[in-house]
Image (tube, grey):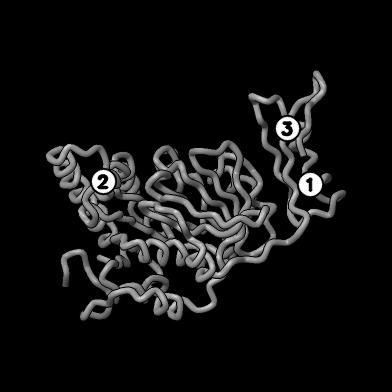
Amino acid sequence: YYIRLAPGVRASKLDRLLEDVGLALGAQSVPTGTLLMKKGLYKLSVQREEVASPTFSQMLSEYKEDFYAPIFVGVSESGSLIYKDLNKLPNLIVGGTTGSGKSVLLHSFIMSLLKSDAKLYLCDPKMVEFQRYSRYNAVNSVANSVLETSAVIAELTKLMNSRFSALRKKGFRSASEMHKQIPGSMPPVCLIIDEWADLVLQDKSLQRQLAILAQKGRAAGISIILATQRPAASVISGLIKANFPGRIALRVASAVDSRVILDKSGAEKIDDIGMGLMLDATGSAPLLFRAPNIQNIDSELKALGLKKSRVSGIFSIFGF
């Protein structure tokens, strides 16, 4: 619906009535309101019918884009599949409480990046979530502690600087441009950190190290995905948020947590597993989506046909 407000009527008044509008229309979720400044209109989006979660295989089969570092986000409230180029975000924060579907969404990101021949560095303080990926060639390391995570960030910072030197010598402005002209020369690199709160509360210096990498990593083809189930201001600081324009909020405990991630409330009203709000640098309002449904991760990985390493177990960045 497109609404033209009468003179003197504030748009914030409609924002406060969204829940009541959803109840009156029998919506599947709380409607979203977006201001179209140039047209002078208030856009009201209402989801009348429930949209089923797509499977990862379905999203893979229908993927037609030519993104440098594709991630499969899910399906929008209108039923269209959502694909994003992580290198254009270029960094992403994912927040959500336990049981909100955060881990499944991260697995979707990892598998889509692996299919695009990206090089991954994974950090998993829980030691169980990312272990299965250590046997694949494209996964350079799986860190499990603060010390190992710090070493991974330092290694990626060196890689970033060496890539900048190569780009300068070859005359390219970005890694994606060089990779397109010279296939295989600079594949995308992604650092994915799960349970960021567990790491940063042990060593606050990690924030500064990560911010340095995040500030300049895009041109070198290096992106970062940061996930946490504790989206507090002490965990996702202003320094981090300034360098992470991509935001995803799954179900959170309070409006305060939603504001920490999205800078606005709304995620606290999500009541379904796998549903979330995504905000990127191109949009002014969060996009409501439903994450892909992955029944068996190992089966999906087997179907991708990825190359395995002869060495099993968890790698270190030094190759041991």
The answer to whether mark 1 and mark 2 are in CB contact below 8 A is no
Give the answer, above or below, for where 113 lies relative to 294: above
Q: Amino acid at mark 1?
A: Glu
Q: Which mark is residue 175?
A: 2
| Element marked by disc 3 | strand
Residue sitting at x 39%, y 79%: 302
For the residues carrying marks 1 and 2, which lies nearer the camera in this image?
2
Quarter where residue 75 is shown: bottom right
Residue 252 in sight here = no
Q: Amino acid at mark 3?
A: Tyr
Counting other residues with Cα less than 10 Å from the Cα at mark 3, is it few (<14), some (14-19), or many (20 or more)? some
Residue 118 shown left or right of residue 2 in the figure: left
| Residue marked by disc 1 | 19
Quarter where residue 240 is shown: top left
For the residues carrying marks 3 and 1, which lies nearer the camera in this image?
3
Residue 22 shown left or right of residue 266 in the figure: right
| Residue marked by disc 3 | 42
Residue occupying the far right of the picture:
24
What is the x, y in percent for residue 94? 49, 54
| Element marked by disc 2 | helix
Residue sitting at x 70%, y 44%: 32
